Amino acid sequence: MACTLYCLLVRHLLNGASRTDALKNAMREFSGVYASSALRDELTHFSLLELPNFSRLPDTEIASSGYVMHTLLASIWCLLNSESYEQCVLKAVNLGSDTDTTGTVAGGLAGAFHGMKSIPFLWEQILARHDDVEVLFKTFLARMPSSASPVPA
């Protein structure tokens, strides 16, 4: 379910929605999918995202352990509380606990919203196996259906 919400959110971000609109639209679709399913009771785990003040929660109330819900909620909170790719990822890492997981998920959301060019050049260059990752990414993009939204620059 967390992956479903993440993918819905990414789709809205890639299609140019604001962060808050993307979350609102993703949550609406997400709830519609699961409200009448056998998993409907699990929706309570996502209720924090529907609070109007979710983005204004202090960082001390944001858990960032390896638990999937903590990671997802922390990553979305970081996206909503940052103005750049770099700021989002640093905010995620500075939450502590499972920093690599939260930083990665938050970075994916920030990349979808801010675009590829927002990733600091130095961060790209020091990425382990940078060239291999770039080839994999370009192969992935080449295999996307033509109707899919392009990755923002």
Image (tube, rainbow, N blue to C red):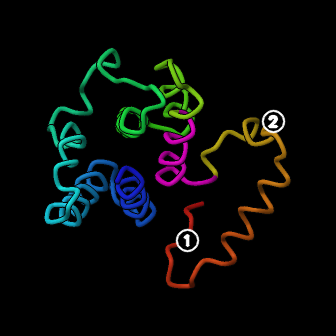
In percent of width and height, residue 82 lies at 42, 33
1 sits to left or right of 7: left
**SS for tag 1?**
loop
Residue count near mark 1 (Cα–Cα under 10 Å), binned few <14, some 14–19, many ≥20: few
The residue located at (42%, 59%) in the rendering is 7
Report, in whole angstroms, how far the alpha carbon at label 1 lies from the one at label 2.
Answer: 26 Å
**SS for tag 2?**
loop
- Compared with 100, 107 (above or below) is below
Residue pointed to by mark 1: 150
Give the residue type that dot 2 points to. Ile
- Compared with 2, 136 (above or below) is below
Residue count near mark 2 (Cα–Cα under 10 Å), binned few <14, some 14–19, many ≥20: few
Q: Specify whether residue 66 is painted magenta.
A: no
> Which quarter of the image is occupied by the C terminus?
bottom right
Residue pointed to by mark 2: 126
> Which quarter of the image is occupied by the N terminus?
bottom left
Which residues, given as a range, are shown in magenta?
Answer: 103-116
- Compared with 151, 73 (above or below) is above
Q: How many numbered tags mark residues here?
A: 2
Q: Magenta part mainly helix, strand or loop?
A: helix
Give the residue type that dot 1 points to. Pro
In percent of width and height, residue 45 lies at 24, 40
Residue 33: image quadrant is bottom left
134 sits to left or right of 143: right
The residue located at (27%, 48%) in the rendering is 20
58 sits to left or right of 83: left
